[in-house]
Amino acid sequence: MDKASIIKDAISYIQGLQYEEGKLEAEIRELESTPKSSLSFSKDFDRDLLVPVTSKKLKQLDSSSSSSLIEVLELKVTFMGERTMVVSITCNKRTDTMVKLCEVFESLNLKILTSNLTSFSGMIFHTVFIEADEEEQEVLRLKIETGIGAYNETQSPTLSIDSLY
């Protein structure tokens, strides 16, 4: 492909995105103008967007102080080579969850190389690159689990570290 056809394809793609954006904005305006009492939900929703909830998570959701907890849906620690670990955490988005995650990582005194927090669709994705050896992978995972569990216990003494999973 030559440069002109690549640019043409890019322009077509951008125009398509702008068209989709316009449709979504119109739909949002329509929904915002509809009274909430008249909204009804049909059975033909996208089941792929639903997040499974375990019984332990359900108990945590039912507790009155659950809004102040960090609810971890997934935690991965992966060795990337050259003394670099990647920690990926997925949490439900709640009040101040981003701040709480940062506080937990700060309290662990890790050698953080870079960190990225992304919020999307009611969830928070936190990716942290940490300087550590491959042998420290499981220790690092346990340290993070313990840090989050300890934070949650200070917020709600009835929850245990099991509530992370």
Image (cartoon, helix red, strand yellow):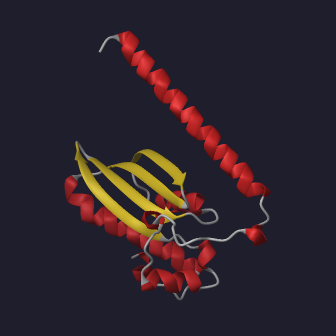
Quadrant of the rendering where the N terminus is positioned: top left
Work out which residue is located at the far bottom of the displayed protein and give it. Answer: 158
**Looking at the image, which is closer to me, 112 or 42?**
42
What residue lies at 54% left-to-right and 28% top-to-bottom?
15
Residue 151 lies, in percent from the top left, at 52, 72
Whether residue 114 sits left or right of residue 133 in the image: it is right
Q: Position of residue 143 (x, y in %)?
A: 37, 67
Q: Residue at x 62, y 71 (%)?
A: 41
Instruction: State the quadrant of the C terminus.
Output: bottom left
- Name the residue rendered at 69%, 45% in the picture: 26
Quadrant position of residue 89:
bottom left
Please tell me which residue lies in front, 125 or 161: 125
Q: Height in image: 33 above or below 160?
A: above
Q: Is residue 23 left or right of residue 92?
A: right
Find residue 8 and report its horizontal and vertical position in percent.
Answer: 44, 17
Does 99 appear above or below 116? below
Does residue 51 lie above or below 126 as drawn? below
> Could you tell whether 68 is left or right of 160 in the image?
right
Q: How many marks?
A: 0
- Give the x, y percent position of residue 35: 79, 65
